[in-house]
Every structure is written in C-alpha cells, then in structure tokens.
C-alpha cells in the first residue's frame, strides 16, 4: 500500500500515457448522463460524475457472451476473454458490488469467464464528488470502500490523493510524472471527504441498520406491500438491468444454419421478467408479479447475504429508483414500510 498525491494536470498526462498502452474504459458523458465507455482521450474522463447509467458489471459479465463453440458430434472449445484492461472511475458502492460478485462467482461453481475478466482488470476507483439524486450509500455503509480496487483516487481540490493497493497499481503509478508522497494535510483532507460521504450520500434514509434486513424479511413474507406494489409493476426488468448486484443469466445455444456447429451463450436475465422461472413443460413456479417483486427484495436483503457472510446485496446506488417508471422499485421505501408495520426486534 502506498499513498501518493498527483496534481490534476499531471493526472491528465498520466491518463493520456495510460490509454496509449492499455485497453481502457472510463466514465464519460453520454446523452446528458454518464456511462462507462472505451476511453480515447484523457479530457473525456469525468471523475466528478454523479452516477453511471449502467454499473461497471458489464465489463465482468457482459450482457451477452459466448461461453463455448461446439460442433455436432461433441467437440467443443471454451471461449475465454483473456485481454487485460483498465477500468477508470468506479465509485465505492460499485466497487463493493464488484467485491460481492467476486465472492459469488468464485464460490460453488467457479465461474471461469467472470473470474478471468476480473483477474485481468485493473480498477481505478474514485470517491464520490457529486451525490446523485437517489443515492443512499450512506444508509447501506457503502459510501466508502477499503478493498477490491488497485488504485483509489480522492479529489482534494487541485490534486488527487492516490492510494495504490496492489503491485499492478505500483507499476502503473511508477510512470506518473511529479507524483509525490501524500502529506498529513492531504490525508486529513481525504478523511474529511470520507466522513462527509459516509453521512451525506443519503437521499433515502433506511430506518434500520442494513444488518437487520434478513431478520426483518423473516417476518414479511406475507405482508400486503408485495401485492400493492406489484399492481403497477410493468415487469420491464429495468431495476434488474441497472443493478450492480443483479447477476442472473440465461444460457442458450445458437446453432449455425448448416446445423454442424454453433455457440453456447449466456445473456442477462431478470427476476422481475415474466418467464424468468419458466422450466420444462411450460411450468412457471413464480408466475405472479407480486411473487417476483418480493423475490427481488428478498434477494437483496436475505438470500444473497446468506451466501456472502451477511453483506446486503443492495449497495444504495439508486439506479433502480432512477429507472423505474411507476416509482415502486426503491428498496428503502419498501424496507421502511416493513419497519413501520413490523417494528425492529
Ligand atoms: S437494488 Fe437498486 S439501489 Fe440497490 S444496488 Fe440495486 S440498483 Fe442500486
Ligand atoms: S423497474 Fe419498476 S416497473 Fe420495471 S420491473 Fe422493476 S419494479 Fe417493475
């Protein structure tokens, strides 16, 4: 671990050199919003962004990917994307979501496709400068992050404090001109930003500790809120698509026109979509929208936490709140309603 400081001008030169040698993706403006995209010029990088349209999960689990090529007769060959890349501008809550995905994709059935991309990634995270209109990371204890990244940047005015956490990071910053050791004043300035974000990224305040959610949901399976909310749900799946901790996928085969070879692929799926639980014989074991709506909130607050040591699988990014047209997807609204009706304890 090494803590340095780099002026913003020198940082821009550092990024210019970086993208001339590495495959790099960075946060940029897109149609008056922000999103991650291939980074072609350092000036395009917008580390002051509020929230990206899509979380960075697409670089580890693409919306559609080929898993293997096969031939009739049984021969097959895995397709693995093995090219290193640098991802620049990941917010702490998204970094925590990636840390959770790392645990999920490496336990039970180790997912070679996800984990190969993850190992090939160099992540440059950045502390939040501009809170988005629906962020509630402070409520979820995800406003700051202390692991998973290679580099963490903190904007302290005319410079960045640079935490280099891995050997990859030390190699990268070794090439930065005019980089100097951070002083005590620099570290104090960073701590002030961490303290501010720990409280201030909170446009929706959860009325209980996140660690209480599994117990709260133990009491809520038959609560009327699921039916009430689901009445206006379009089953569009937007809340799944934009969520950094949703990772469900569907696997299917595409056979070439000559019926001699093909590809096995997987694509994002979403538990709010009708047909998500359809199995052989057209049987659908979660065919009511209210059940699907409840399932998403149970995944975030109970089922996934049971697999990853109690970590709550909502990191408070607020994207589902932004993306839901009828305004029913906000997890805080629902959990707070359950706290009001069922109490704490
Ligand atoms: S449930 Fe909503 S707020 Fe929570 S991580 Fe997913 S998209 Fe973000
Ligand atoms: S975004 Fe809203 S309307 Fe669409 S599936 Fe999710 S909860 Fe339903």
Image: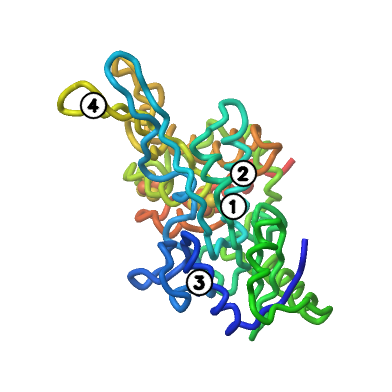
Residue 247: % across, % down: 48, 40
Residue 50: % across, % down: 51, 69
Nearer to us: label 3 or label 4: 4
User: Residue 338 falls in which quadrant of the image?
Assistant: top right
Q: Which residue lies furthest to the left in this view?
A: 257
Q: Can residue 259 be seen in this view?
A: yes
Measure the alpha-carbon separation of dots 2 and 4: 34 Å
User: Residue 189 falls in which quadrant of the image?
Assistant: bottom right
Measure the alpha-carbon separation of dots 1 and 2: 10 Å
Q: Earlier in the sequence, mark 1 or mark 4?
A: 4
Q: Is residue 219 visible?
A: no
User: Looking at the figure, which quarter contains the C terminus?
Assistant: top right
- Ligand 2 within 8 Å, label 4 CB: no
- Ligand 1 within 8 Å, label 1 CB: yes
Q: What element carries label 4?
A: strand
Q: What element carries label 2?
A: helix
User: Looking at the figure, which quarter contains the N terminus?
Assistant: bottom right
Instruction: Say above or below: 216 vs 277.
Output: below
Circle 3 sits on which residue?
Answer: 49
Circle 1 sits on which residue?
Answer: 315
Residue 170: % across, % down: 70, 63
């Amino acid at each position: 671990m090494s803590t340095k400081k780099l002026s913003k001008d020198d940082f821009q030169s550092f990024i210019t050199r970086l993208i001339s040698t590495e495959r790099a993706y960075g946060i940029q403006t897109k149609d008056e919003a922000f999103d991650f995209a291939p980074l072609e010029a350092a000036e395009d990088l917008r580390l002051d962004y509020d929230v990206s349209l899509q979380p960075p999960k697409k670089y580890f689990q693409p919306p559609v990917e080929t898993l293997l090529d096969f031939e009739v007769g049984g021969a097959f060959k895995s397709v693995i994307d093995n090219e290193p890349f640098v991802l620049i501008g990941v917010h702490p809550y998204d970094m925590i979501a990636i840390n959770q995905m790392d645990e999920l994709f490496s336990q039970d059935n180790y997912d070679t496709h996800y984990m190969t991309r993850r190992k090939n990634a160099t992540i440059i995270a950045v502390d939040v400068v501009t809170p988005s209109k629906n962020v509630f990371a402070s409520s979820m204890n995800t406003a700051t992050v202390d692991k998973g990244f290679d580099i963490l940047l903190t904007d302290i005015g005319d410079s960045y404090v640079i935490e280099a956490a891995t050997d990859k990071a030390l190699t990268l910053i070794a090439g930065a001109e005019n980089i100097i050791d951070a002083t005590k004043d620099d570290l104090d300035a960073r701590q002030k930003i961490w303290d501010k974000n720990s409280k201030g990224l909170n446009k929706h305040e959860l009325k209980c500790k996140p660690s209480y959610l599994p117990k709260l949901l133990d009491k809520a399976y038959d609560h009327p809120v699921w039916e009430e909310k689901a009445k206006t749900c379009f089953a569009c799946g937007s809340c799944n698509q934009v969520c950094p901790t949703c990772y469900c996928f569907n696997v299917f085969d595409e056979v070439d026109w000559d019926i001699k070879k093909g590809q096995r692929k997987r694509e994002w799926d979403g538990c709010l979509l009708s047909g998500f639980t359809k199995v052989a014989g057209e049987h659908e074991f979660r065919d009511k929208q209210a059940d699907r709506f409840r399932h998403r909130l149970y995944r975030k607050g109970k089922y996934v936490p049971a697999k990853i040591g109690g970590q709550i699988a909502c990191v408070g990014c607020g994207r589902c709140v932004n993306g839901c047209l009828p305004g029913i997807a906000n997890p805080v609204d629902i959990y707070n309603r359950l706290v009001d009706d069922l109490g704490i304890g």
